[in-house]
Image (cartoon, rainbow, N blue to C red):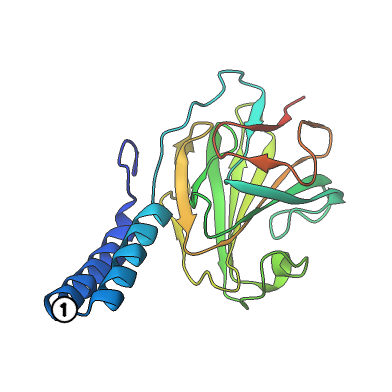
Amino acid sequence: MRGDSIPIVREGYPFIGLVAFLTFILAILHLQVPALLGLATTFFVTYFFRNPDRIVPTDPDAVVAPADGKVIAIETNKPALPFFSQEEFTRISIFMSIFDVHVNRAPCAGCIEDMKYFRGKFIAAQKEKSSEKNERNCILLKTKSGSPVVVVQIAGLIARRIVCWKKVGEGVNAGERIGMIRFGSRVDVFVPATWRLEVRVGARVRAGEDVICRQI
C-alpha cells in the first residue's frame, strides 16, 4: 500500500527539495543568517512530512483515530452527509496542528464504497462551520458487518491540498494509510450512534494506534 515503510511521504519531496536548494544557494552566497533560517525551514518541512509506522490494535472491534491531533468535538445524532440523511451517527472531530503527523489512516477495516470531493472555503478548521463549508473529501467505508463509517478530510485556513491515495472499490485495513492534508487541518469520522465511545473532547490521539470507539 502506498506510503508504507517510507519515513517521508512522497508529496513532501518537492517541498523539501525546493527549500534545501534555496538554502544551498544562500549558503554559497555567504548569507549566513538567511542560510541558517533556510536550514531550519528545511528541517521543519522534512519533519512535517514524516510518515511513521504505527502499532495498530488487533481487536477487530476497535475503531482507531484517523488522524493525529486533538479531539475538538464529539456530537451524537448527526447525519453523515452527503451519504446519509436519515441514519444517526456520532461525529468525532480531530484537529491537526502543523506539528502533528498529517498522514491519515483508515479507522477500521472495510471497503470504500463511495467518495465525494467538495470545493469550498478555507475557514479555520477548529470552527464548527468548517465541517460543511470548507473544501473536503468524504470517504464512505462499509465494514465487514455492513456498518457504514464516513471519514471526512477537511481543509483548513492554511491547508490547501487534500490527498487521498485510495479509490472506490478498494479494501482497507484498520490503521492503513489512506491520504494526508497539507499544513494543518481536521478530520471528522462518523460512526453509528450505537458504537461505544472510548475518547473524550480534549484528548490527544495518534492515528492508527489510539482507539476512539468500539463497534457493537
Name the residue located 31 percent from the left edge and 67 percent from the top edge: 15
> Which percent across, then down, holds residue 77?
88, 48
Residue 108 image-quadrant placement: top right
The kind of residue on which mark 1 rests is His
> Which percent across, then down, holds residue 143?
62, 32
In the rendered view, tell whether residue 47 sits above or below residue 2.
below
- Please state which of residues 142 and 95 is positioned toward the viewer in this rendering: 95
- Please state which of residues 78 and 211 is positioned toward the viewer in this rendering: 211
Q: Is residue 48 left or right of residue 109?
A: left
Give the class, few, some or many, for how many residues have Cα within 10 Å of label 1's Cα (few <14, many ≥20).
Answer: few
In the rendered view, tell whether residue 16 sits above or below residue 204.
below
Name the residue located 62 percent from the left edge and 39 percent from the top edge: 65
Judged from this view, the residue extending furthest toward the right is 77
Name the quadrant of the C terminus: top right
The residue labelled by disc 1 is 30
How many numbered circles does the render carry? 1
- Please state which of residues 77 and 95 is positioned toward the viewer in this rendering: 95
- Please state which of residues 148 and 107 is positioned toward the viewer in this rendering: 107
Q: Is residue 85 left or right of residue 7?
A: right
> Which percent across, then down, holds residue 29?
14, 81
Name the residue located 52 percent from the left edge and 69 percent from the top edge: 159
Judged from this view, the residue extending furthest toward the top is 59
> Which percent across, then down, holds residue 144?
60, 27
In the rendered view, tell whether residue 60 sits above or below residue 54.
above
Q: Is residue 181 left or right of residue 192?
A: left
Name the residue located 54 percent from the left edge and 40 percent from the top edge: 106
Name the quadrant of the N terminus: top left
Q: Is residue 125 left or right of residue 171?
A: right
Mark 1 element type: loop
